Image: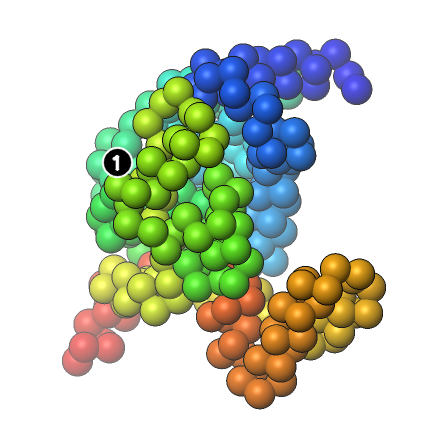
């Protein structure tokens, strides 16, 4: 491991302890390496999606909830002009360190994504990668993104699925069963009791496919789902053959039955852990033509 990478990990470890308390170092999230690998996997998905649908070079890009800045650094390295925004000063310090380690210049902004401090129609691209589930006013966030995007501006939006069987069995944020089906007040106490965090727990609210589509329609967005269920049954069949856990095998057989009988709808609603959407903001002219 390079000295630069180790220095960054050390800073991230310090930030996690300061944010969550020393118990974070004993948590499954930390021990399984998710703290290190989460940004990497998200960055890879976002960059692959952008590569397929839009050229980032020379584009004015907003990275909402940039966290430690991995996606922002990758975008700047590919020629985009990036504004990295986060509500946490601690994460922005880590993003600054990541930019410095990469030898790149970053534009970092401390702000709430629900109230963006930018003029209308100023960004070509907006990235909202696993952020919308963390904000109280989710519709307001999407409305603000639409406000600052230029007409026909490009949006990449990723978020976990509320109806995913796997997310119900193990929440993607706290790695606890049934977190998202509990009332918010009880869910926060539940996390504190098990994880023993020293800070207030984020009121994470996962969205259903129907909720996302409704929000998209209200904010004049045209979003396309990237993930596809084409090879889903083959993947599940292979998992059934290779797993030795009887409980997991039963769950996989149920998933395979659902995919066979219900097809794409079952895949989208119950199996997919999360959704990756790409799309554009509908221009005023196109909106008038639709309503006219």
Q: Residue furthest right?
A: 242
Q: From this viewpoint, is residue 262 visible?
A: yes
Q: Residue at x 75, y 74 (%)?
A: 237
Q: Which residue appears farthest toward the left when viewing the image?
A: 292
Q: Residue furthest bottom?
A: 261
Say if 43 sits above or below 154 in the image.
above
Quadrant placement of the C terminus: bottom left
**Horizontally, is 166 left or right of 269 in the view?**
right
Q: Position of residue 70 (x, y in %)?
A: 57, 31
Residue in the image at 44% along x and 26% along y: 196
Q: Residue at x 63, y 68 (%)?
A: 251
Residue drawn at (24%, 77%), measured in percent from left and top? 290
- State the image coordinates of residue 92 (x, y, percent, origin top left): 44, 21
* Location of residue 231 with respect to 281 vertically, above or below: below
* Residue 50 seen anywhere in this rendered image of the structure: no
Towards the viewer: 30 or 103 = 30
Query: Label 1 belongs to which residue?
Result: 116
Please give left or right for residue 81 compared with residue 149 in the image.
Answer: right
Query: Quick one: 114 or 191, which is closer to the camera?
Result: 191
Measuring from the top left, give residue 264's x and y in whole percent. Answer: 54, 79
Where residue 42 appears, as percent x and y from the top left, is 57, 43
């Amino acid at each position: 491991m390079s000295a630069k990478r180790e220095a960054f990990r050390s800073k991230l470890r310090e930030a996690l302890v300061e944010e969550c308390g020393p118990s974070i170092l004993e948590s499954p999230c930390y021990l399984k390496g998710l703290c290190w690998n989460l940004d990497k996997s998200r960055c890879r998905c976002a960059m692959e999606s952008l590569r397929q649908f839009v050229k980032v070079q020379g584009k004015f890009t907003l990275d909402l909830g940039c966290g430690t800045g991995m996606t922002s650094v990758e975008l700047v390295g590919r020629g985009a002009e990036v504004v990295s925004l986060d509500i946490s000063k601690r994460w922005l310090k880590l993003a600054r360190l990541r930019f410095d380690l990469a030898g790149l210049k970053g534009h970092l902004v401390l702000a709430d994504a629900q109230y963006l401090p930018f003029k209308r129609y100023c960004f070509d691209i907006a990235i909202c990668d696993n952020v919308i589930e963390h904000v109280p006013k989710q519709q307001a966030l999407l409305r603000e993104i639409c406000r600052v995007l230029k007409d026909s501006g490009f949006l990449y939006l990723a978020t976990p699925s509320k109806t995913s069987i796997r997310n119900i069995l193990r929440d993607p944020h706290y790695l606890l069963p049934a977190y998202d089906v509990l009332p918010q007040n009880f869910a926060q106490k539940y996390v504190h009791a098990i994880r023993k965090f020293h800070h207030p727990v984020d009121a994470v609210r996962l969205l259903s496919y129907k909720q996302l589509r409704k929000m998209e329609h209200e904010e004049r967005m045209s979003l396309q789902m990237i993930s596809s269920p084409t090879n889903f049954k083959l993947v599940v069949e292979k998992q059934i053959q290779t797993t030795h856990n009887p409980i997991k095998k039963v769950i996989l057989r149920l998933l395979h039955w659902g995919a066979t009988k219900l097809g794409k709808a079952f895949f989208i609603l119950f199996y997919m852990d999360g959704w990756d959407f790409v799309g554009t903001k509908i221009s005023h002219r196109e909106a008038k033509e639709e309503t006219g």
